[in-house]
Image (cartoon, grey):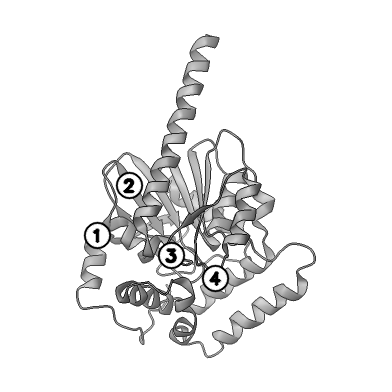
Amino acid sequence: MNPQPSNLPLLSAQEPRYLQACLPLSTVDIGRGRQVAVRCAGDGEQWVVCLHGIGSGSASWLRVAQQLPPGLRLLAWDAPGYGLSTPLEMDKPTALDYARRLQELLHALEVKDFVLVGHSLGALMAGAYARHLDQGEMQALFLMSPAIGYGRPGLEQRRQAVWDQRMAQVASGDMSLMARQRHQRLLSEQATAENRELVLWIMASLHLAGYQQAVQMLCQEDLLTYLPLSSSVPVAVSCGEVDVVTTPEACAGVARACSQHLQLVPQAGHASYVEQPGAMLEALQSLLGQTQALRSVATTRSSHEQ
């Protein structure tokens, strides 16, 4: 079990209670003494499975849960090594290793017919799942401010620099120090004090070992090796217009790999779904519309062939 940090910055007095009321935390037993921590909201039939980034966690989807429209059911996990989720066994996991843990979670919860949303590092996990593990249950893929990774040939120096920088920031073992250094990079200058506080609190809650595993994965992976997907799977790619972590220019390259136009989110930084949850939900509804249209075409084609 991961220990809980004792020196976290405090949220406003009502925030923790509201978090549990709006996006309650639970754990799912996936066998062999392992568990995955999840937060769920909504009771609709349409599942939306959300994967957070390297400096975040399941609680970051709170603003989305607060505006969740009827008909949707949000499932946000804490990735292995985050929160109360059992870490992966290997020191240097791949995106596919994380994706396999996601598959175990979805099977345990009997989640079918879902949209998979991956933010930042979560986009690498989502891409690996979509390419190698999906068995037709994933209806669509939504990549938000996707991290491409540093695993491509020719990036050896950059890869080492990223590793060295990230490890230097957590050398003391005090994740709250790293959080104070980095959390501002996830948000725009217009971000509210409440959102800054939420992002800081979540980042300060990270576990060193889980974070180190995630950085290893970031350094060795290349999202573009998982793209494009089958034309039968709708894909959307978005990015905050002032994202300084995964810039609009970099995200546009991911969108091109998916034969899509990049959707820019106004007045938002890297964690655009925290600052502008309504924009995320609007894009999600559009993606679901594409899914329904493709299903309608497939049904019509099938009936004509019979």
Residue for badge 1: 22
Residue for badge 3: 268
Give the Cα distance between marks 3 and 4. 10 Å
Q: Residue furthest toward the right?
A: 154
Could you tell me residue 203's position as x and y percent? 43, 76
Give the Cα distance between marks 2 and 1. 12 Å
Please identify, in this view, whether the residue under mark 4 or under mark 1 is nearer the observer: 4
* Dot 3 crowding, Cα within 10 Å, few <14, some 14–19, many 20+: many
* Residue 110 visible within the image: no
Please identify, in this view, whether the residue under mark 3 or under mark 2 is nearer the observer: 3
* Dot 1 crowding, Cα within 10 Å, few <14, some 14–19, many 20+: some
Mark 1 is on which residue type?
Cys
Callout 3 touching callout 2 (CB < 8 Å): no
Residue for badge 2: 73
Task: State which tag comes first along the sequence, 1 or 3.
Answer: 1
Q: Determine the secondary structure under disc 4.
A: loop
Could you tell me residue 289's position as x and y percent? 42, 35
Task: State which tag comes first along the sequence, 3 or 2.
Answer: 2
At x 34%, y 71%, the residue is: 195
Could you tell me residue 258's position as x and y percent? 62, 45
* Dot 4 crowding, Cα within 10 Å, few <14, some 14–19, many 20+: some
Residue for badge 4: 244
Mark 4 is on which residue type?
Val
Could you tell me residue 185's position as x and y percent? 49, 75
Mark 3 is on which residue type?
Ala
At x 36%, y 57%, the residue is: 277
Give the Cα distance between marks 4 and 1. 30 Å
Q: Determine the secondary structure under disc 2.
A: strand
Task: State which tag comes first along the sequence, 2 or 1.
Answer: 1
